[in-house]
Image: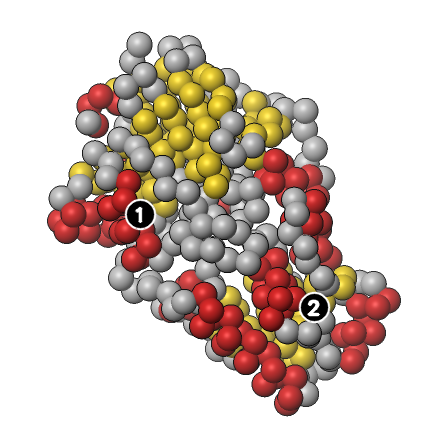
C-alpha cells in the first residue's frame, strides 16, 4: 500500500483510508488522526475537540490545567508507546523541549519517518535531552537553524541569570522575568529553586502550568502573586517575579525586567535590562550534529531558518533537504 508524505496545513501522512496530521494548523481536520507534539500555542492551532487528538500525558495535563481543555477525545500517550494506524506504527519519543514534548516516529513496512516538533538536545533542570531516533526521512524543526544562533553552555547562562538577579536585589529593584508561561517559566523557577534561596513569585497563569509539571514529578517551589503571602512578598521585593509575555500590569515599585530566549542573540528590546539566551530549542550546532547522527536519506526543515538550514545541509553535508512547506504530498518511496 502506498504511503504519502507532504504538507497540507501541517505535516500529513496518508496510508489507505487513514490520514494522519502532525501539529495541524487549521481545525479542518475532523477526519484525520491528529498528533500534537507539545502544548505551545503555535503547535495546537489545529486542536479540534471533535477530532481524534493524540498527545503525551504531559501535554494533556498542561492543556487541562492551563486551559481547562478536558476532552474525551484527547488520547494520551506514553513515551515509547506504539499506536497502530493501518500498516503504520506511530511512537512518541522525548523531544526535550518542555514537559510532554514529543517527537513522533512513523514506522512503515520499509521506511521510517521522524517528525521532531520543537526539540532540545541538552539536559536542562526540567527536561532531559531529546532522544536520537534513526530514520530514513527526518522532518526537523529549524527555529535556530542559522550560525547566528550558537548558545553558551547551560551552566554559564544559569550563572548570568543568578548574577543579574542578585545585582537587582542589591540595588533595591524587584527582578522580573517576562517569559513564556509554559516551559521557560518553570525552567527559571527551577534554576532559582536549585541554585539559590531567593523566593520565587509567579503570576497565576504560570502557576497553572506549574501544577501540570508537579503532577508529572517536577518539584517546583513558588508562591502565587495573587495570594496574601504573594502580595506580601511583592511588597518586600525580596523575591524574583516570573510573569507571562502578555503581562502588562507592572508593579508600582522600582523593578528591572529580564527576558530569556534564544532570540536575544540577535534581537533585543531596550525595555529589558537583562537578556539571557536560555532556550528550550536546539541551537545551530546541535541541529547539525543531530542530522549527522541520524544519517537520514532525506531531510525536511520546518520553522524559522528552514530555507537556510536546508541549503546548508545540501551543500555542506551532501544531504538532500528541503523546507517541508514546499512539498506537496508524494509517495514516500520518491523521497528515498
Ligand atoms: Zn514550542
Mark number, residue 164: none
Q: Residue at x 81, y 70 (%)?
A: 231
| Residue on which the image places disc 2 | 200
Nearest the camera: 241 or 27?
A: 241
Q: Left of 71 or right of it: where is 3?
A: left
Is tag 2's residue or tag 1's residue first in the polypeptide sequence? 2
Q: Left of 265 or right of it: where is 192?
A: right
Q: Quadrant of residue 282?
A: bottom left
Alpha carbons under labels 2 and 1: distance apart: 35 Å
Q: Left of 311 or right of it: where is 82?
A: right
Q: Nearer the viewer, mark 2 or mark 1?
A: 1
Quadrant including the N terminus: top left
Q: Position of residue 309 (x, y in %)?
A: 25, 50
Nearest the camera: 99 or 294?
A: 294
Q: Position of residue 280 (x, y in %)?
A: 47, 55
Q: Quadrant of residue 325?
A: top left
Amino acid at each position: 500500500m502506498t504511503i504519502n508524505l507532504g504538507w497540507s496545513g501541517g505535516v500529513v501522512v496518508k496510508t489507505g483510508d487513514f490520514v494522519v496530521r502532525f501539529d495541524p494548523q487549521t481545525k479542518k481536520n475532523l477526519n484525520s488522526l491528529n498528533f500534537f507534539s507539545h502544548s505551545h500555542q503555535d503547535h495546537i492551532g489545529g486542536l479540534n475537540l471533535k477530532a481524534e487528538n493524540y498527545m503525551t500525558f504531559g501535554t494533556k495535563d498542561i492543556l487541562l490545567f492551563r486551559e481547562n481543555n478536558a476532552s474525551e477525545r484527547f488520547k494520551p500517550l506514553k513515551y515509547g508507546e506504539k499506536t497502530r494506524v493501518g500498516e503504520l506504527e506511530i511512537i512518541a519519543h522525548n523531544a526535550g523541549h518542555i514537559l510532554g514534548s514529543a517527537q513522533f516516529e512513523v514506522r512503515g513496512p520499509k521506511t521510517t519517518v521522524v517528525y521532531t516538533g520543537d526539540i532540545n538536545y541538552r539536559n536542562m533542570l526540567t527536561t532531559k535531552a531529546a532522544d536520537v531516533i534513526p530514520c530514513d526521512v527526518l522532518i526537523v524543526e529549524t527555529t535556530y537553524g542559522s550560525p547566528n544562533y550558537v548558545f553558551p553552555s547551560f551552566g554559564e547562562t544559569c550563572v548570568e541569570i543568578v548574577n543579574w538577579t542578585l545585582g537587582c536585589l542589591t540595588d533595591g529593584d524587584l527582578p522580573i522575568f517576562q517569559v513564556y508561561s509554559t516551559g521557560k517559566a518553570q525552567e527559571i523557577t527551577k534554576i532559582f529553586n536549585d541554585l539559590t534561596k531567593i523566593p520565587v513569585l509567579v503570576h497565576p497563569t504560570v502557576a497553572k502550568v506549574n501544577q501540570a509539571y508537579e503532577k508529572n514529578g517536577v518539584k517546583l517551589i513558588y508562591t502565587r502573586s495573587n495570594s496574601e503571602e504573594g502580595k506580601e512578598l511583592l511588597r518586600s521585593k525580596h523575591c524574583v517575579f516570573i510573569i507571562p509575555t502578555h503581562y502588562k500590569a507592572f508593579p508600582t515599585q522600582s523593578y528591572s525586567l529580564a527576558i530569556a530566549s534564544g532570540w536575544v542573540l540577535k534581537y533585543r528590546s531596550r525595555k529589558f535590562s537583562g537578556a539571557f539566551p536560555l532556550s528550550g530549542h536546539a541551537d545551530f550546532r546541535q541541529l547539525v550534529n543531530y542530522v549527522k547522527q541520524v544519517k537520514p536519506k532525506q531531510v525536511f526543515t520546518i520553522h524559522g531558518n528552514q530555507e537556510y538550514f536546508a541549503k546548508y545541509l545540501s551543500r555542506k553535508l551532501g544531504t538532500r533537504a528541503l523546507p517541508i512547506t514546499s512539498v506537496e504530498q508524494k509517495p514516500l518511496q520518491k523521497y528515498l
